[in-house]
Image (cartoon, rainbow, N blue to C red):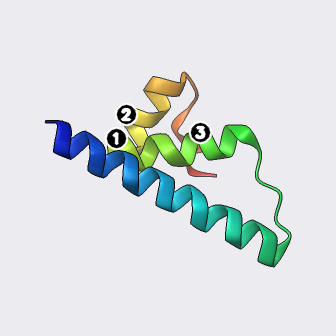
Amino acid sequence: MFMIQDTINNVKQYLLMIISEINLINMVNYTLKQLYSFEAVIRLSSFTKASKELNITQPAVCV
């Protein structure tokens, strides 16, 4: 179980690093809400589960 959690944390850190690099390259400003949504979708592997966890509608997660 710990190995899976470590892997998930490593993937999250890597994805956030990529987002940061893309943000710097393209000068795109992501909101904190968008980053939380993205992280939840990756972690839960589901837009529906992420929307329920974040207490927002599914279309808001997909944006």
Local secondary structure at mark 2: helix
Q: Could you tell me if residue 60 is visible in this image?
A: no
Whether pointer 1 and pointer 2 mark residues with C-beta atoms closer than 8 Å, the reply is: yes
Amino acid type indicated by mark 1: Leu
Residue under circle 3? 36
SS label for mark 1: helix
Residue receiving disc 1: 44
**Mark in front: 2 vs 3:** 3
Marked residue nearer the N-terminal end (1 or 2): 1
Residue for badge 2: 49
Q: Position of residue 28 (x, y in %)?
A: 82, 65
Locate residue 2, reporting x and y percent. 18, 37
Label 2 Cα crowd, 10 Å radius (few <14 / some 14-19 / many 20+)? some
Q: CA distance from mark 1 to mark 2?
A: 6 Å
Q: CA distance from mark 2 to mark 3?
A: 13 Å
Instruction: Give x and y (percent) for residue 26.
Output: 81, 76
- Which label's residue is closer to the chain start, 3 or 1? 3
Relative to the observer, which residue lies in front, 14 or 45?
14
Instruction: Tell me which numbered mark, 2 or 3, is placed earlier along the sequence.
Output: 3
Q: Are marks 2 and 3 in contact (CB under 8 Å)?
A: no
**Which residue sits at x=52%, y=38%?**
58
**Position of the N terminus by quadrant:** top left
Residue positioned 77% across, 45% down in the render: 31
